[in-house]
Image (spheres, rainbow, N blue to C red):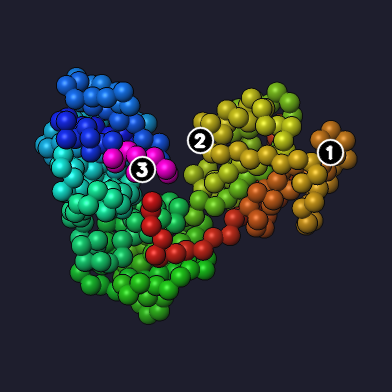
Amino acid sequence: MNISIFSVTENGRQLSQRVAEMLRGEHFVSRYCFHKHTDDDSAVFWNMGSMVGRLFQRSDAFIFICACGIAVRAIAPYLGTKADDPAVIVMDDHGKFTIPVLSGHIGGANCLAEVIAEAVGGTAVITTATDVGGKFSPDSFAVANDLIITDLKAAKEIAAAVVDDEKIGFSSDYPHSSLPDELTAFGICRTGVYVGHDMSAKPFEVTLRLVPKNIVLGIGCKKGTSEDSIEKAVSDALGRYDLDITMISEVCTIDIKKDEEGLCSFCQKYSIPMRTFTAEELMNVKGNFESSDFVLETTGADNVCERSAVLGSGGKLMIHKTASNGVTVAAAEKPIYLDFDRKIL
């Protein structure tokens, strides 16, 4: 996570150092101190609201060591939707209380607050009903297992049903750990969760579809292929199978394409990591792939897109080679295991 920590007082500055040091092992942390109480490891601010505005789009979490009202006023002008807002946590400058005030589930503020509170010897003040009652949270489960929440309204209705002790149905195309008490895979339920790529599935009257982000794209392309051509080829290939770019976890290709401008730009546009393999690694992949003598002569591998998709995913092809304007695209599904005990952080 990209975490921004703000402090106002001298006690707050010292506490921000402790929190930053604790978090920096796993996260990128930046500190911002009010100009009267700063140090060499922090940036200086005079107006908190203006600084928050500059950081809002590129921060996954904000930690404010100050009065709650100051923090709320600083973030208020920049808030968007539940799905997009960063985690926001407020701490008093003695570290007694750590309070997640925004994006407790989806943004991971609740879990982050608990980690911080334990580290500084304080108390995490969690106010979300499912957490207070120790119950299943569809938001937290989705984020922890890298699942896309397709309907926030349905998620909210299911969370409310959990709090009201209504049994929630569960249907999944993937293996999973033992279900929590609030969920059942049997019987007829009004509300329920479905995990899979079938966007038409509706096993319950109120169905929350959680879509795994586990599709690995294999892409091959001619030298100099534009970003637009790659994007269109990917869109066409996914569209035939009712899949979406948001489901892509990784793009894989051959190593000679690691600096291909159009391909790199495509990955950067959608924030998709790219991984490359040598021709030898690709040729060692077992399976039945469409072979091309031209591609073999040019790259050293007889097929780039299918082989790289399978190698990158460790799974099976779900989209075989499709070709369009010098771009070849294939896709494979990465095996996943759903864990109800997995934490967001």
| Disc 1 to disc 2, C-alpha distance | 29 Å
* Residue position for label 3: 23
Badge 2: residue crowd in 10 Å (few <14, some 14–19, many ≥20): few
Residue 175 shows up from this direction: yes
230 inside magenta stretch: no
Asked which secondary structure carries label 2, the reply is loop
| Disc 3 to disc 2, C-alpha distance | 27 Å
Looking at the image, how many numbered discs can be counted on the residues? 3
Which corner quadrant of the image does residue 65 belong to? top left
Residue 123, percent from left and from top? 19, 54
* Residue position for label 1: 300
Residue 25, percent from left and from top? 42, 43
* Amino acid at the residue labelled 3: Leu
Q: Which residues are magenta?
A: 18-26
| Disc 3 to disc 1, C-alpha distance | 44 Å
Residue at the location (77% across, 53% down)?
285
* Amino acid at the residue labelled 2: Tyr
Quarter the N terminus occupies: top left
* Residue position for label 2: 270
